[in-house]
Amino acid sequence: MNKISRKSKGEKPKDAYLVVVEGQTERIYIEKLKEQERSLLKGSAITIEPKIESKGSIQRRKEQILKDRKEKHYAKIYWILDGDELSRSDKVKGQFKRILNELNRYKDIIVLVNMPCIEYWFLLHLKSTTALYNQCKQVEEELKRTGKKREQKFLSNYDKKQRILEKVYEELKPFQKDAIERAEALKCTKSIEHPCAGIYLFLKELGL
């Protein structure tokens, strides 16, 4: 009698990814990536968590990630974090360092830091920079100035309103390869001490 291979309950396809984000900006960016790149992603499944914005501690988020890894069988889990939040106090810095050390044993959990925030990744689409910004507000102002110079009207008025965020992926797509090259040149995916746009690694995984 031939044996038929069956997937266990809750098991995900080989190319199923879980992307854990900390805020609305990252969530909308990944959602728009899914929409815009539907033909390229084909059968790949990307789940974004949490479903609604949550300000839970990184320790609780880490515990949930390990639970999802055990129960849901994703091919890879990407945890995308803002560096400015991780560097706001010595206590949080120490906690993040301990979490990194713990998660390093799991090859399928990839921690990615944008330092200070995802807007630094947006900025790299328009200019090459190795400047270290300690606060996201600084990057947002530079994004506006650069957007104005590059005649990117929607960026010259950048803010975190949903109507603006929903345009970001599509508007920056023509400059994406430049951004990936610039982010890769920083040689950084999870630092809170150096400028970093770790999210590029997720896009490379998808073949973008």
Image (spheres, rainbow, N blue to C red):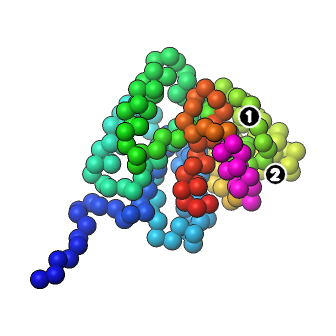
Q: Is residue 163 visible in this depiction of the protein?
A: no
Q: Is residue 105 left or right of residue 207?
A: left
Pointer 1: what residue? 130
Relative height, residue 102 to residue 170 (above, below):
above
Q: Quadrant of residue 60?
A: top left
Quarter in which the C terminus is drawn: bottom right
Q: Is residue 54 visible in this depiction of the protein?
A: yes
Q: Which residues are magenta?
A: 174-185
Q: Nearer the viewer, residue 103 or 32?
A: 103
Q: Residue at x 38, y 63 (%)?
A: 14
The residue positioned farthest toward the left in the image shown: 1
- Mark 1 vs 2: CB contact within 8 A: no
Q: Residue at x 71, y 56 (%)?
A: 177
Pointer 2: what residue? 152
- Badge 2 marks a residue whose secondary structure is loop
Q: Nearer the viewer, residue 104 or 47?
A: 104
Q: Nearer the viewer, residue 202 or 148?
A: 202
The residue positioned farthest toward the top in the image shown: 90
Q: Amino acid at mark 2?
A: Gln
Residue 95, given in percent of the width and then of the height, sits at 42, 24
Q: Quadrant of residue 160?
A: top right
Q: Is residue 83 left or right of residue 91?
A: right
Overall secondary structure of the magenta stretch?
Answer: helix
Residue 37, given in percent of the width and then of the height, sits at 59, 65
Q: Is residue 149 left or right of residue 132?
A: right
| Chain-order first, disc 1 or disc 2 | 1
Q: Amino acid at mark 1?
A: Thr
